[in-house]
Image (cartoon, rainbow, N blue to C red):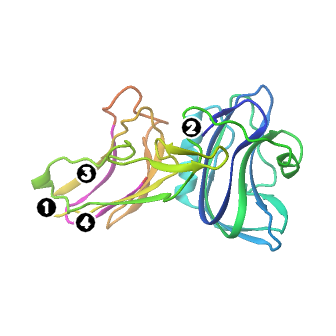
């Protein structure tokens, strides 16, 4: 997401990765020409690299940024049939699951979140490239674009965050309670490293982080859990699991987004008996 909007061809981010990796990207074509956003894996070793893609959510180019972001969350949480790739020695391939990279028109966005693993070190590149031409060939001629403001791009450790209730919630004793996510204070932002600029960076918003929240409960009666966006306009999906059901919940369920210039928007995530536990994946 840095630069969020690019105005020329170039490398948007690049690093060496191995093992379990999550790629999150979010870029707008700021030029007056059609472009493509390419996800490229390069293997510089003498042996083939084995890649396993576990979850994949990549939007179609879209002029509605909220719609694009919401779409990739739905695909990511629903999961796909995992697929495998081989990166031959001293070669590059696309991480995209299609042979043709979609064309991104001017002012349109392309965003995505992909979980994959590699059995050896490979170079991962996100690049803005011309509409025509081979991505790997173009990559050799590209320079790294400077980051935007705020400087959000980088490589971060601990892409998953598990949050556990310190004690079971009792509705009769505790009354209404809240769990705050992504505020940068009670839930701190990740610190990382931008290898292209050799600068430390802070992931303000914890973009790309998957939260798994476990809320144990006790007592009697029914409990309702609501989602309340407090950081501004919001569009997304969550996975919710109780003893009796597991489901995806659109946030909001009706309409594309909510939380614009108000703190009073809520979406019901689950209603369940006290004594059960609630899992929310966000």
Please give left or right for residue 138 compared with residue 234 in the image.
right
> Could you give the CA–CA distance between mark 2 and mark 4, rounded to whole angstroms?
42 Å
Q: Which of marks 2 and 3 is in front?
A: 2
Quadrant containing the N terminus is top right
- Tell me the crowding category of disc 3: few under 14, some 14 to 19, or many 20 or more residues within 10 angstroms, Cα based: few
Q: Mark 1 points at which residue?
A: 220
Nearest to the observer: residue 148 or residue 219 = 148
Please give left or right for residue 179 compared with residue 40 in the image.
left
Reading the chain from its start, which is encountered first: label 2 or label 4?
2
Residue 205 placement (x, y as % from top left): 46, 42
Residue 151's disc number: 2
Residue 167's disc number: none
Residue 33 placement (x, y as % from top left): 80, 29
Vertical side of 66 occupied by 168: above or below: below
> Could you give the CA–CA distance between mark 3 and mark 4, rounded to whole angstroms?
12 Å
Q: Name the residue under label 3.
A: 224
Nearest to the observer: residue 177 or residue 5 = 5
Vertical side of 278 occupied by 84: above or below: below
Nearest to the observer: residue 123 or residue 194 = 194
User: Tag 1's secondary structure?
Assistant: loop
Residue range of the region highlighted in magenta in the rendering: 266-281
Occupied quadrant, residue 99: bottom right
Occupied quadrant, residue 278: bottom left
């Amino acid at each position: 997401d840095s630069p969020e909007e690019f105005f020329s061809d170039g490398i948007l981010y690049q690093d060496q990765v191995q093992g379990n990796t999550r790629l999150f990207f979010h870029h707008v074509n700021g030029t007056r020409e059609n472009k493509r956003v390419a996800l490229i894996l390069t293997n510089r070793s003498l042996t083939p690299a084995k890649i396993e893609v576990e979850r994949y959510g990549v939007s179609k180019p879209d002029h509605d940024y909220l719609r694009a972001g919401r779409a990739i969350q739905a695909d990511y949480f629903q999961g796909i049939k995992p697929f495998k790739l081989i990166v031959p020695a001293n070669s590059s391939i696309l991480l995209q699951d299609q042979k043709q990279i979609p064309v991104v028109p001017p002012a349109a966005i392309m965003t995505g979140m992909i979980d994959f693993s590699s059995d050896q070190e490979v170079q991962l590149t996100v690049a803005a490239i011309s509409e025509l031409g081979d991505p790997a060939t173009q990559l050799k001629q590209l320079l790294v674009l400077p980051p935007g403001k705020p400087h959000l791009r980088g490589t971060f450790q601990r892409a998953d965050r598990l949050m556990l209730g310190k004690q079971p919630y009792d509705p009769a004793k505790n009354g209404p309670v809240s769990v705050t996510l992504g505020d940068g204070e009670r839930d701190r932002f990740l610190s990382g490293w931008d290898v292209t600029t050799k600068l430390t960076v802070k992931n303000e918003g914890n973009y790309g982080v998957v939260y798994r929240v476990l809320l144990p409960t006790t007592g009697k009666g029914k409990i309702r859990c609501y989602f309340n966006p407090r950081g501004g306009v919001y569009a997304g999906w969550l996975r919710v699991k109780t003893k009796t059901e597991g489901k995806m919940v659109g946030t909001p369920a009706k309409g594309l987004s909510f939380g614009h210039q108000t703190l009073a928007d809520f979406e019901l995530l689950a209603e369940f008996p006290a004594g059960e536990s609630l899992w929310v994946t966000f």
